[in-house]
Image: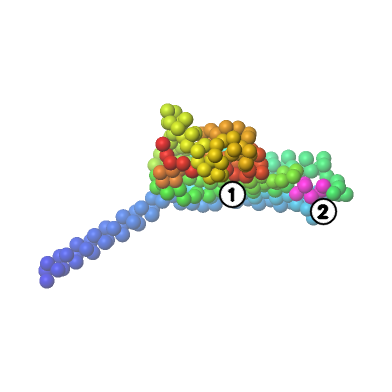
């Protein structure tokens, strides 16, 4: 009986320790918040047509290096405004400058009788959030920009930013592909593209899809690590015309 109670006590102690460990791990998880802004105003006083600016960005709380690195990227590379204390202030500054620029353009081109008046319904939306990448040590943050600034069509682009969770460092493709492996990786990307699009070689790929018509493949920082693979994303006009859309390539890590 005593032996049974001793074993039972050890099991309870083990479970209690395991529960504590799980709780402790959850406390170490980054705390996410959200910064948002939305502006929708008539393109001209009294007009029913409106322009639209909207930002929705997940942000990290606290003053850790990871939170600071993400905030720097959002300010410098996503919102293009430096020198502001918070992401919310940065959003406001960026939206204000965008709105002022749009108002000047619209005032110059506005004609209530024009059949092209609807092309002034400008819109600019940015969404940003962490995405699952299968790598516990790396945080991947995705931003999506969906906009229409007049003309025949709008634009839709996606960017990835990868951070080392422990140090907070913004990672570069060179952290994954050393210089002596660059040619090997580029060749693997080319081979995978041809396979994905059922082309026998690069020349046929260009003829069939337009991919690589605007430039050769390169080691882009717009990538996501996925377990033992790397997924690259080329946006409109990076290596192909607009009609080709977004082009993804996934290869094994070198």
Say above or below: 12 vs 153. below
**Mark 1: few/some/many CA within 10 Å (<14, 14-19, 20+):** some
Most extreme residue toward the bottom, as rendered? 1
Say above or below: 203 vs 25. above
Most extreme residue toward the left, as rendered? 2
Q: Determine if the magenta segment contains residue 119.
A: yes
Report the residue at 81% width, 53% height from top.
Answer: 47
Q: Determine if the magenta segment contains residue 22.
A: no
Residue 72, percent from left and from top: 53, 39
Towards the viewer: 146 or 86: 146
Towards the viewer: 81 or 1: 1
Report the residue at 50% width, 49% height from top.
Answer: 130
Residues in magenta? 116-121
Label for residue 100?
none
Of the residues under marks 2 and 1, which one precedes in the sequence? 2
Give the structural element (helix, strand or loop) at label 2.
loop
Report the residue at 86% width, 47% height from top.
Answer: 114
**Residue 205 is at least partly visible in this image:** yes
| Residue 171 placement, left or right of 13 | right
Towards the viewer: 139 or 79: 139
Q: Which colour scheme is used?
A: rainbow
Say above or below: 175 vs 55. above
| Helix, strand or loop for the magenta stretch, by majority | helix
Towards the viewer: 74 or 152: 152
Quadrant (top left/top right/bottom left/bottom right) for the N terminus? bottom left
Quadrant (top left/top right/bottom left/bottom right) for the C terminus? top left
Q: Which residue is denoted by mark 1 in the rendering?
A: 127
Give the number of callouts.
2
Q: Which residue is denoted by mark 2 in the rendering?
A: 46
Most extreme residue toward the front, as rendered? 200
| Residue 34 placement, left or right of 138 | right
Frontmost of labels 2 and 1 is: 1
């Amino acid at each position: 009986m005593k032996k049974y109670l001793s074993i039972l006590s050890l099991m309870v102690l083990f479970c209690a320790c395991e529960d504590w460990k799980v709780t402790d791990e959850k406390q170490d998880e980054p705390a996410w918040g959200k910064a948002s802004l939305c502006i929708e105003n008539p393109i001209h006083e009294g007009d029913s047509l409106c322009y639209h600016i909207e930002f929705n960005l997940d942000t990290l709380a606290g003053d850790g290096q990871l939170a600071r690195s993400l905030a720097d990227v959002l300010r410098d590379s996503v919102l293009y405004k430096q020198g502001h204390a918070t992401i919310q202030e940065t959003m406001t500054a960026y939206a204000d400058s965008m709105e002022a620029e749009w108002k000047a353009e619209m005032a110059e081109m506005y004609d209530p009788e024009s059949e092209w008046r609807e092309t002034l319904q400008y819109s600019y939306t940015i969404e940003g959030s962490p995405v699952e990448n299968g790598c516990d040590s790396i945080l991947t943050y995705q931003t999506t920009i969906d906009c229409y600034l007049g003309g025949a069509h709008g634009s839709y682009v996606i960017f990835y930013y990868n951070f080392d969770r422990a140090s907070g460092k913004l990672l570069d493709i060179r952290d994954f592909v050393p210089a002596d492996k660059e040619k090997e990786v580029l060749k693997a990307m080319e081979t995978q593209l041809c396979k994905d699009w059922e082309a026998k070689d690069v020349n046929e790929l260009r003829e069939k899809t337009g991919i690589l018509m605007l430039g050769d493949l390169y080691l882009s920082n717009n990538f996501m690590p996925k377990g033992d693979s790397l997924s690259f994303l080329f946006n409109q006009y990076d290596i192909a015309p607009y009609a080709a859309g977004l082009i993804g390539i996934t290869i094994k890590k070198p």
